[in-house]
Image: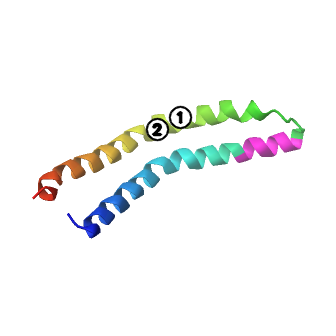
Amino acid sequence: MNVGYVLDVSREVIWTIVKVSAPLLIISLIIGLIVSVLQTITSIQEQTLTFVPKFLAIMLILVLCGGWMLSTVAELFTELMAQIPTIIR
């Protein structure tokens, strides 16, 4: 096992993390911005107001994209486990 291989595996793992977490982070950002604008317009300064909409949106995204997320992570795990015999030689 050399440094190039470790860097390739690290890059692949980080890219998978970015791909899998992007839908959740993007929807959380969008909902947070919308609620913040509404709070500014209505002068409501409640800090916990964003929790419920973000929670519901993230649960919806998990229901819609959860299968894809799980299969992506499982595919990476399977690929890494299949490479173990090659690594230990």
Query: Is residue 40 on the magenta stretch?
Result: yes
Report helix, strand or loop for mark 1: helix
Identify the residue at horizontal 88%, vertical 38% (top origin): 42
Identify the residue at horizontal 13%, vertical 55% (top origin): 88
Observer-nearest residue: 29 or 57? 29
Q: Are marks 1 and 2 in contact (CB under 8 Å)?
A: yes
What is the x, y in percent for residue 21?
Answer: 48, 48
Per the image, the residue denoted by label 1 is 60
Vertical side of 87 occupied by 20: above or below: above
Identify the residue at horizontal 37%, vertical 62% (top origin): 11
Observer-nearest residue: 6 or 63? 6
Highlighted range, magenta: 33-41
Q: How many dots with numbers?
A: 2
Give me the disc on residue 13.
none
Vertical side of 86 occupied by 73: above or below: above
Q: Amino acid at mark 1?
A: Leu
Vertical side of 53 occupied by 27: above or below: below
Identify the residue at horizontal 56%, vertical 37% (top origin): 58
Query: Is residue 36 on the magenta stretch?
Result: yes
Give me the disc on residue 64.
2
